[in-house]
């Protein structure tokens, strides 16, 4: 997979993240084909970037479990 420039994306915290500061996942918006995610407690560590189809299947599997 090619490198993805995330320097100008807008990050939003997942609605499923708790409000006490732990277990916070952020998702970058603005790219219809990719889903970048990162740990909001350690954003400098970088992001994992998933293709939309893979992310959709992952989330669907979580919902079914």
Image (spheres, grey):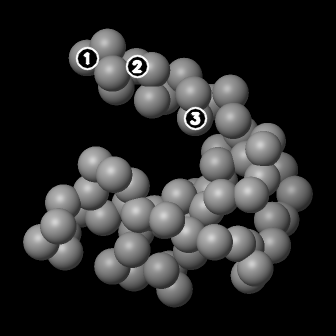
Residue of label 2? 61
Disc 1 on helix, strand or loop? loop
- The image position of residue 21, as x and y in percent, is 19, 75
Whether label 1 touches label 2, CB < 8 Å: yes
Of labels 2 and 3, earlier in sequence is 3
Asked if residue 15 lies left or right of residue 28, the reply is left
Disc 2 on helix, strand or loop? helix
Front residue of this view, candidates 15 and 39: 15
Q: Residue at x 83, y 50 (%)?
A: 1
Q: CA distance from mark 1 to mark 2?
A: 6 Å
Q: Residue at x 45, y 20 (%)?
A: 60
Residue of label 3? 55
Q: How crowded is the residue under tag 1: few (<14 C-alpha within 10 Å), some, or many (20+)? A: few
- For this orientation, the residue located farthest to the bottom is 44
Q: CA distance from mark 1 to mark 3?
A: 16 Å
61 shown above or below 40: above
Of labels 1 and 3, earlier in sequence is 3
Asked if residue 34 lies left or right of residue 47, the reply is right
- The image position of residue 19, as x and y in percent, is 17, 67
- Residue 65 is tagged as 1
Asked if residue 28 lies left or right of residue 13, the reply is right
Whether label 2 touches label 3, CB < 8 Å: no
- The image position of residue 36, as x and y in percent, is 62, 57
């Amino acid at each position: 997979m090619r490198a993805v420039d995330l320097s100008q994306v807008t990050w939003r915290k997942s609605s499923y993240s708790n409000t006490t500061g732990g277990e916070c996942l952020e998702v970058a918006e603005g790219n219809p084909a990719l889903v970048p995610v990162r740990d909001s407690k350690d954003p400098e560590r970088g992001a994992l970037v998933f293709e939309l189809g893979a992310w959709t299947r992952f989330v669907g599997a979580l919902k079914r479990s």
